[in-house]
Image: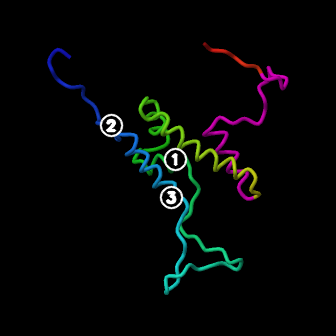
Amino acid sequence: MASGKSRAGRPPKYKTVEEMQAKIDAYFTACEGTPLLDDEGKAVTDKYGEPVIVGAHPPTVTGLALALGFTGRQALLNYQAKTKFVDTITRAKARCEAYAEERLFDRNGTTGAQFSLKCNFGWNEKAPADTDGEVRIVDDL
């Protein structure tokens, strides 16, 4: 850039990993919901004595992307390519994946969990055709 002009383009959405991590933590906390309180400020419980939680929702990659201010899932995946943020975003996506994986053991959540794991995380029901159950280690070094 001989003319001394800076590169044109949008400034980065996040300057530091810590700034992004704070937003990620807030997203996962919001997913947990909050206890429903009665007029006296006490937690309302269900018939089993468990607190009634309102506003809880499953953590998803798209939900994470929107909470971070991205336009959608693909924009988050594109941002993940930045070396500075790759571990932070990968770890956050792994938390979404872990939730979906846990739902595989929940009778009511298996179908949605299977869909999410296949589409978002590359899970597959069948082993590749060229394997016979044998584990092969590939050394890429």
Q: Amino acid at mark 2?
A: Pro
Residue 34 colored magenta?
no
Q: Count residues near mark 3 (Cα–Cα under 10 Å), then give few for <14, some for 14-19, many for 20+.
A: few
Mark sitting on residue 29 = 3
Task: Report the residue marked by disc 2.
Answer: 12
User: Whole-percent x and y of residue 28?
Assistant: 52, 54
Q: Are marks 2 and 3 in contact (CB under 8 Å)?
A: no
Residue at disc 2, secondary structure = loop
Q: On the picture, is 96 further left or further right than 83?
A: right
Q: Earlier in the sequence, mark 2 or mark 1?
A: 2
Q: Amino acid at mark 1?
A: Thr
Q: Nearer the viewer, residue 16 or 127?
A: 16
**Front residue (pair 89, 6):** 89
Q: Residues within 10 Å of mark 2 (few under 14, many from 20)?
A: few
**Looking at the image, which residue is at 63% across and 39% down?**
119
The nearer-to-camera label among 2 and 1 is: 2
Which circle marks residue 62 in the picture? Answer: 1
Query: Separation of disc 1 and disc 3 at Cα?
Result: 16 Å
Q: Residue 100, image x and y in percent?
A: 65, 49
Q: Quadrant of residue 97?
A: top right
Looking at the rendered structure, the kind of residue marked 3 is Thr
Q: CA distance from mark 2 to mark 3?
A: 25 Å
> For the magenta stretch, what is the residue range?
108-135
Quadrant location of the C terminus in the rendered image = top right
Residue 123 x/y as whole percent: 69, 36
> Which structural element holds mark 1?
helix
Circles 2, 1 touching at the beta carbon (< 8 Å):
no
| Quarter the N terminus occupies | top left
**Quarter assignment of residue 107:** bottom right
